[in-house]
Amino acid sequence: MSNEQLDALRDELDKVNLQILDLINERASLAKKIGQVKDTGGKNRFDPVRERNMLDLIAENNKGPFETSTVQHLFKQIFKASLEIQEDDNRKALLVSRKKKQEDTIVDLKGETIGDGNQRLILGPCSVESYEQVYEVAKAMKAQGLKLLRGGAFKPRTSPYDFQGLGKEGLEILKRVADELDMVVISEIVSPKDVEMATEYIDVIQIGARNMQNFELLKEVGKVDKPVLLKRGLSATIDEFINAAEYISSEGNSNIMLCERGIRTYEKATRNTLDISAVPILKQETHLPVLVDVTHSTGRRDLLLPTAKAALAIGADAVMAEVHPDPAVALSDSAQQMNIPQFQDFLTSLRDSGLYKY
Ligand code: PEP
Ligand code: MN
């Protein structure tokens, strides 16, 4: 074959490629239209019977030289891409998505901004146990210029026989300490009926990992004018996590912070497995601030500092860790909370590393 003939065949191939390109895009447009009709009719986008019929039709009409199995494989890829294009459209519409809003959401907690590139620390005891206990931690934080205090008043515990928290009394303690020391308080709420009441005591409502898909609770916090710290569920995918945030946003409250707190894997060396790559993924996919809880993700005091460094290095907007005046006698999470000197060393090391700047 001469070079001219080869060039002619290549030109022909380019033309066919362009025809295929036009045709698959035409197909995508049709699939999108069908998807929209199905959405309004409340029907599932994926229809296996229809897909089987299309594959059969292709098999009946295949004249080769491609094998039927090859052609079917190629078409299945096209079907899959068409389904994805419909789902992409759906994602585009999510209020929390970067596609919907380009700029970062900045949550302002009494002047402490989260999400504007100033990386913060959120600290405090696992459970609120007494006024003196919270005050001691808050005082040590304040001495270091830290304002973001967290403590649990309603504790969702694995066992019903474990300490369940002081409830409303715990919120009262947090508020008293916050007023006295000018702190910002974050505390978990576990029931929709307590949301309204809690807004009188705390500055940020935390939704714990076990409640990430408590949709009634998510809707309720979506209705109040308080920032929400939403933790990733124990076995939740990133997509499920984003959709949980969407539940809050869709009710009108877009002051949401996402918190990666480790996920359940087969690994036993740590309490959970810190999914560090979730941080940049969530920051790409959403416009919300992303936090890392190093206490619950590792469950190990010796890993708090290295994981906090990793979180700051990868771009987390804040790092959360637990501090208790005497962890050995703490009513929850005694193995992983730092005592006050350990917290001071933790902070000094973070500052010395250059990763934490405040
Ligand atoms: C907590 O932050 O106090 C807590 C219980 O963590 P998680 O919901 O992530 O388990
Ligand atoms: Mn804890």
Image: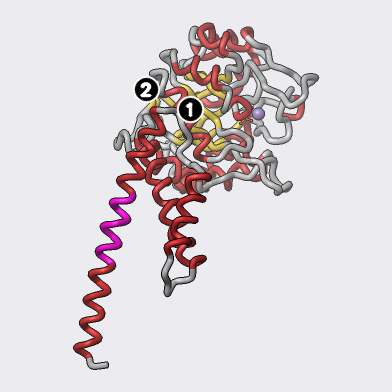
- Amino acid type of the residue tagged 2 in the rendering: Gly
Magenta extent: 17-27
Q: Secondary structure at mark 2?
A: loop
Ligand 2 image-quadrant field: top right
Q: Which mark is residue 111?
A: 2
Q: Secondary structure at mark 1?
A: loop
Name which quarter of the figure residue 139 lies in: top right
Q: Which circle, 1 or 2, is nearer the viewer?
A: 2
Q: Is disc 1 in contact with disc 2, using a CB cutoff of under 8 Å?
A: no
Residue lying farthest to the bottom in this orientation: 2
Residue at the (60%, 21%) spot, across then down:
151
Structure colour scheme: secondary structure
The residue wearing badge 1 is: 146
Check the image and report above or below for 241 versus 84. Answer: above
Q: Quarter of the image containing the N terminus?
A: bottom left
Query: Magenta region, mostly helix, strand or loop?
Result: helix
Q: Is mark 2 within 8 Å of ligand 1?
A: no
Q: Residues within 10 Å of mark 2 (few under 14, many from 20)?
A: few
Please state which of residues 239 and 280 is positioned toward the viewer in this rendering.
Answer: 239
- Amino acid type of the residue tagged 1 in the rendering: Leu
Residue at the (39%, 43%) spot, across then down:
284
Q: CA distance from mark 1 to mark 2?
A: 12 Å
Picture coordinates of residue 217 (x, y %)?
Answer: 55, 18
